[in-house]
């Protein structure tokens, strides 16, 4: 595979995961449990949209086929999306949303910390800003997991159920393929497999403080980065992409 094709695929994968999680978080707008958290989730979603725009714009520039960041975001079907399956899972209750975002934010913060040293100036530039935002996301969501786990009997039971349901999607965060290997060899991206022990420590510290029990290993999700998704992504995209598809020539 040529370097440009590898860079395009990597950038779209990064953008897709950020955009899909952003859409999920912004679904809370006007529905948050308290005003401050309603705003916080929307702001985290906007941070992720900014990250996705950086990667989509770079991908469109690499492709050179006339597509824009909006084309990549709004005019591809679910089998063309390459996000991790974790981020497309439904919001559930507030604790469920915090658990999903914590898992992804902890991973993405570590990844972007390393991507700041990329030999690719665009990727390192996106990573520099994203790393600062994602550190806050991981800290904020982690604090809520501790509060809920160490709260009432009901809040503890609910956040434990969220952990049990979402845990099987976390292994996929560290999946790689030959595209990643090619870019790692050029110093463009980091080997995310090397970040897994640090992620484990970060996550287990929060779960331990919350009094939560990590589920035993069992079924694990995989395939999102190759377009194999859960049933939830297509429904989400049909809502997210409705206006751009209904009015493709509109200018806002």
Image: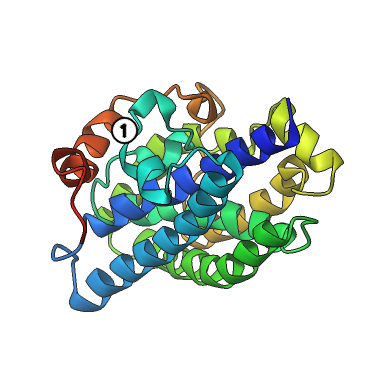
**Going 72% across and 61% down the picture, which residue do you hit?**
121
Residue 141 in percent (x, y) is at 43, 64
**Going 25% across and 78% down the picture, which residue do you hit?**
36
Residue at mark 1: 233
| Residue furthest bottom as drawn | 36
Q: Label 1: few (<14), some or many (≥20) within 10 Å?
A: many
**SS for dot 1:** helix
Q: Is residue 82 visible?
A: yes
Split into 4 quadrants, where in the image is the N terminus? top right
User: Would residue 235 appear left or right of 224 to someone viewing this image?
Assistant: left
Residue 179 in percent (x, y) is at 70, 31
Image quadrant in which you'd find residue 239: top left
Q: Is residue 187 above or below residue 34?
A: above
Q: Is residue 132 above or below residue 100?
A: below
User: Would residue 199 appear left or right of 225 to someone viewing this image?
Assistant: right
**Going 78% across and 45% down the picture, which residue do you hit?**
194
């Amino acid at each position: 595979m040529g370097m440009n094709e590898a860079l395009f695929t990597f950038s779209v994968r990064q953008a897709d995961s950020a955009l899909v999680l952003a859409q999920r978080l912004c679904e809370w707008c006007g529905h948050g449990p308290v005003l401050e958290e309603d705003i916080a989730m929307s702001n985290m979603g906007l941070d992720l949209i900014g990250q996705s725009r950086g990667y989509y714009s770079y991908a469109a520039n690499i492709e050179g086929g006339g597509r824009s960041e909006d084309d990549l975001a709004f005019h591809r079907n679910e089998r063309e999306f390459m996000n991790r399956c974790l981020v497309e899972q439904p919001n559930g209750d507030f604790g469920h949303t915090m658990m999903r975002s914590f898992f992804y934010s902890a991973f993405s913060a570590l990844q972007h910390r390393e991507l700041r040293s990329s030999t690719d100036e665009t990727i390192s530039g996106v990573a520099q800003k994203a790393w600062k935002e994602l550190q806050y996301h991981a800290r904020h969501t982690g604090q809520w997991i501790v509060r809920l786990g160490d709260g009432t009997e009901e809040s503890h039971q609910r956040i434990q159920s969220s952990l049990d349901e979402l845990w099987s999607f976390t292994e996929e965060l560290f999946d790689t393929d030959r595209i990643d290997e090619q870019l790692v060899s050029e110093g463009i991206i980091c080997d995310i497999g090397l970040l897994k022990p640090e992620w484990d420590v970060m996550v287990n510290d929060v779960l331990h403080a919350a009094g939560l029990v990590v589920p035993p290993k069992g079924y694990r999700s995989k395939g999102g980065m190759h377009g194999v998704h859960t049933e939830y992504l297509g429904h989400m995209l049909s809502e997210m992409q409705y206006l751009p598809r209904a009015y493709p020539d509109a200018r806002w």
